[in-house]
Image: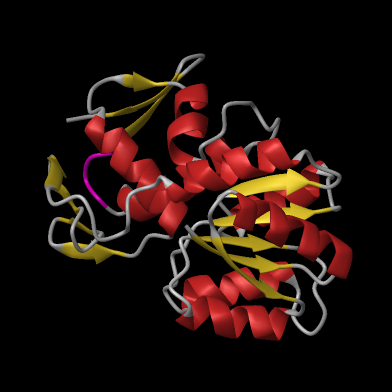
Amino acid sequence: MKILIAEDDVETGEFIVQGLQEQGHVVDLAQDGVSALDLARHGMYEVIVLDRMLPQLDGLSLLKSLRQSNVQTPVMFLTAMGGIADRVDGLESGGDDYLVKPFAFSEFHARICSLGRRPPLGEPAMKLKVADLELDQISRSVRRAGKVIDLQPTEYRLLEHLMKNVDRIVTRSMLLESVWQFNFDPKTNIVETHVSRLRAKVDRGFEKELILTVRGSGYKMLS
């Protein structure tokens, strides 16, 4: 894979680059946020790793700029900021994973590979339709009753999973694993927050609500 590392600590950056190169990856290293943003916009990376506390441009601001520029490359935060609020901020800003320093390289590499296995945003080629809601997996566009619905990357993946499991209960742990690639519970309300935001875009203002909360179990997309 081609990977971008944004890390201002020289020793940590060199350690990560060497480890990834030994695993056969192509790696670029940026030591400030401005350089990282420029590389991320033009480098065609498969995964980006961001420190939160970068000089010139912090990691959260960098990621928000990327998403606003429609760069949808999977992003992992690798940072010493390990509080629950820090994790929530990182994930809700558009991050796909969050790992706290100090870290085991084996876990770091496994998570990088997991992010890299996600299908490119232009694939696969099919459309999903539930009631008057349509999701085009080629263009990654969403419409309801002909109205275009603008979704963030995580909201799109969440809706896609719900539509693929229409009329089935989808648990919180299933969503954490399929949407966020977590095999553990981060002990935050990240699922509930994103479902609420998705509902506001997909259901609000329409005659029928399609996303149902199943108390004590999870969520269901109604046909």
Q: Position of residue 144 (x, y in %)?
A: 19, 55
At a point 28% along the width and 38% down the height, the residue shown is 209
Q: Quadrant of the C terminus?
A: top left
- Say if residue 210 shows up in the picture: no
Q: Is residue 91 above or below residue 166?
A: below
Label count reads 0
Q: Nearer the viewer, residue 212 or 207?
A: 212
Q: Is residue 47 above or below residue 6?
A: above
Magenta stretch: includes residue 22: no
At a point 30% along the width and 54% down the height, the residue shown is 205
User: What secondary structure is the stretch in magenta mostly built from?
Assistant: loop
At a point 12% along the width and 48% down the height, the residue shown is 126
**The image quarter in which residue 146 lies:** bottom left
Residue furthest top as drawn? 216
**The image quarter in which residue 14 lies:** bottom right
Q: Nearer the viewer, residue 146 or 139?
A: 139
Q: Position of residue 103 (x, y in %)?
A: 80, 42
Please indicate whether residue 207 sits to the left or right of residue 75 in the image: left
Asked which colour scheme the image uses, the reply is: secondary structure
Q: Is residue 90 above or below residue 222?
A: below
Q: Position of residue 125 (x, y in %)?
A: 13, 52
- Say if residue 167 shows up in the picture: yes
At a point 46% along the width and 50% down the height, the residue shown is 116
Please indicate whether residue 192 sits to the left or right of residue 84 in the image: left
For the record, the magenta segment spans 206-210
Please indicate whether residue 123 sits to the left or right of residue 218 in the image: left
Q: Nearer the viewer, residue 62 or 12?
A: 12
Q: Position of residue 222 (x, y in %)?
A: 23, 29
